[in-house]
Image: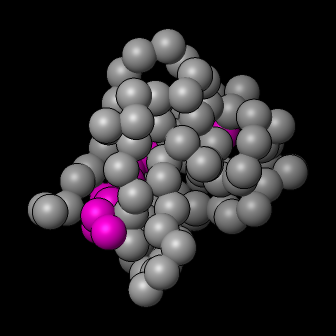
Amino acid sequence: MAAKHFNITLGAAAVRLSDAYGGAAGANPDPALDIPYRQLLFSAGGADAFIGDDAQVTGTDYGMAVDSTALGPASIGPFETGPIKLSQLWAAGAGSTLHVLGIPF
């Protein structure tokens, strides 16, 4: 399967990354759309982005920061087994647009 990319506008309140698929914000996405990824690459534009595992992600409570001035992307993976889905991740970052490149499993 070919690579997929998404752009997600962030705010101070966390959004579920699978919101990029459309549908109700923060809800579980259509399983046919929520495919597993071997690797996810992240770049932030406008402001830093913060990624974590639940809706409580903020600029001070997060698992991973994506620096908007970084020269290269931040990465989750690649995984040989145990892929990750966008629905498992949340992001926040007022003024940030998170650019995601996913390599399907």
Residue 69: in sight, yes or no? no
| Residue at figure coordinates x 23%, y 53% from the top left | 4
Q: Residue furthest top?
A: 24
Residue 28 versus residue 93: which sits nearer the camera? 28
Q: Quadrant of the C terminus?
A: bottom left
Q: Main secondary structure of the magenta part?
A: strand
| Residue at figure coordinates x 36%, y 50% from the top left | 35
Residue 98 higher or lower than 40, as above or below: above
| Residue at figure coordinates x 51%, y 62% from the top left | 84
Residue 19 higher or lower than 4, as above or below: above
Residue 79 higher or lower than 98, as above or below: below
The answer to whether residue 17 is left or right of residue 102 is right
Residue 52: give x, y in percent of width and height: 71, 53
Q: Is residue 8 magenta?
A: no
Residue 58: in sight, yes or no? yes
Q: Is residue 102 magenta?
A: yes
User: Magenta segment range?
Assistant: 92-105
| Residue at figure coordinates x 48%, y 81% from the top left | 81
Residue 103: give x, y in percent of width and height: 29, 67
Q: Residue furthest right?
A: 60
